[in-house]
């Protein structure tokens, strides 16, 4: 971001360091991630997949939802890069992506709802 002169100088450091402010596109990425997690069931499925790798049928049973509903949430989480899948024969297994973004969201969810991670 080019150096920008503000109409009022209040003497705050950020007023003179606006070139280090993230781009609008960066904030849009964050917004899109939070939209992904705008559904409690999706957050619950994501949290679960941070702790295990499971198939749709087992996830459905664990969260007491239909398989089509779980599949819908899994597609959205996968499109957002928060989970990954692998095929083993006819079965597809899902787990949280091994990314900094997914790990930060996992920790944020646990802090916000005060859930303790199960021991490994």
Image (cartoon, helix red, strand yellow):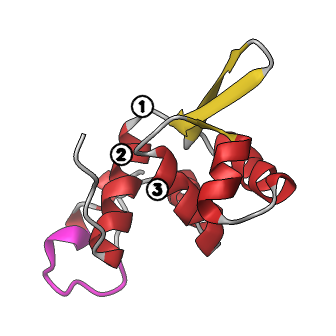
Local SS, label 1: loop
**Magenta residues: mostly which secondary structure?**
loop
Give the residue at x 19% y 87%: 10
Q: Residues within 10 Å of mark 1 (few under 14, many from 20)?
A: few
> Label for residue 98?
1
Which of 49 and 97 lies nearest the eye of the viewer? 49
Give the residue at x 28% y 53%: 118
The residue segment tinted magenta is: 6-15
- Which one is earlier in the sequence, the residue at label 3 or at label 2? 3
- Check if mark 2's residue and mark 1's residue have beta carbons within 8 Å: yes
**Any part of residue 38 in sight:** no
Give the labeled residue for mark 2. 103
- Which one is earlier in the sequence, the residue at label 3 or at label 1? 3
| Residue 31, x across and y down, in percent | 57, 64
Which of 18 and 100 lies nearest the eye of the viewer? 100
Tell me the quadrant of the picture where the C terminus can be found: top left
Identity of the residue furthest to the right in this view: 68
Local SS, label 3: helix
**Residue 11 is one of the magenta-drawn residues:** yes
Which of 38 and 4 lies nearest the eye of the viewer? 38
Give the residue at x 64% y 28%: 85
**In the image, is residue 13 above or below residue 18?**
below
**In the image, is residue 24 above or below residue 41?**
above
| Residue 45, x across and y down, in percent | 58, 56
Local SS, label 2: helix
Give the labeled residue for mark 3. 47
- Check if mark 3's residue and mark 2's residue have beta carbons within 8 Å: no
Distance Cα–Cα, label 2 vs label 1: 7 Å
Distance Cα–Cα, label 3 vs label 2: 10 Å
């Amino acid at each position: 971001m080019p150096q920008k002169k503000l109409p009022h100088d209040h003497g705050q450091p950020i007023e003179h360091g606006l070139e280090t402010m993230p781009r609008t596109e960066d904030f849009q990425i964050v917004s899109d991630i939070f939209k992904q997690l705008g559904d409690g069931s999706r957050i619950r499925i994501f949290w679960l997949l941070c702790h295990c790798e499971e198939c749709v049928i087992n996830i459905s049973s664990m969260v007491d939802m239909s398989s089509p509903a779980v599949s819908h949430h899994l597609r959205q989480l996968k499109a957002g890069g928060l989970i990954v899948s692998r095929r083993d024969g006819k079965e597809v297994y899902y787990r949280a992506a091994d990314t900094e973004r997914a790990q930060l969201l996992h920790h944020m969810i646990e802090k916000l709802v005060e859930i303790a991670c199960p021991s490994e």
